[in-house]
Image (tube, rainbow, N blue to C red):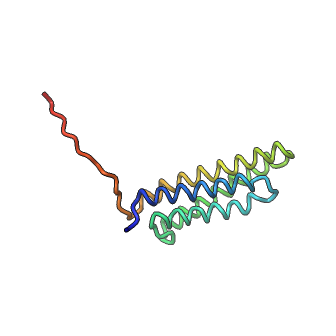
Amino acid sequence: MSKSLQDADREARRLVNNWTTGAALTGWIPGSAFFLTAADTAMIHQVASVYGVNAFDMEHLLSILSGAVGSAIAGGVIAEVVGIVPLVGWAVKSAAMAAKAKVIGDAVMRYFRERSPLPDTRLLIDVDVDDD
């Protein structure tokens, strides 16, 4: 059985949720913005792969790099602003890093879904409505 677009959607959602959870659990660690930027880049590459999109195509490579740069900027700002406050700041930083991972993940899911060569297996029913 070949993989459909709906199968890819489920797998990509699971990946994004796992990466988001990882960011939530580790975001409080000092210096985590650096490794979470790498994690976001890995997530983007994995989502591209799930949708059957060659991430090393120049257009897709640029999307991965812009995602990584956006992640680095957002992560750096989050870390600098809230990470200096012990406990409460660390909790806020973890939540913000998780939110950042989810936003990036959702965006790349939409991006690569639109470019996926996988078949859409949803059953579409054509309903004729009489105009009496």
The answer to whether 126 appears left or right of 47 in the picture is left
Q: Residue at x 50, y 67 (%)?
A: 49
Q: Is 127 drawn above or below residue 117 in the view shown?
A: above
Q: Nearer the viewer, residue 33 or 18?
A: 18
Q: Nearer the viewer, residue 124 or 44?
A: 124
Where residue 50 appears, as percent x and y from the top left, is 49, 65
The answer to whether 131 appears left or right of 100 in the picture is left
Q: Quadrant of residue 65?
A: bottom right
Q: How many marks?
A: 0
Q: Quadrant of residue 16?
A: bottom right
State the quadrant of the N terminus: bottom left
The answer to whether 100 appears left or right of 108 in the picture is right
Q: Residue at x 61, y 65 (%)?
A: 42
Q: Is 30 drawn above or below residue 95 in the view shown?
A: below
Where residue 54 appears, as percent x and y from the top left, is 47, 70
Q: Residue at x 26, y 46 (%)?
A: 125
Where residue 5 appears, as percent x and y from the top left, is 40, 59
State the quadrant of the C terminus: top left
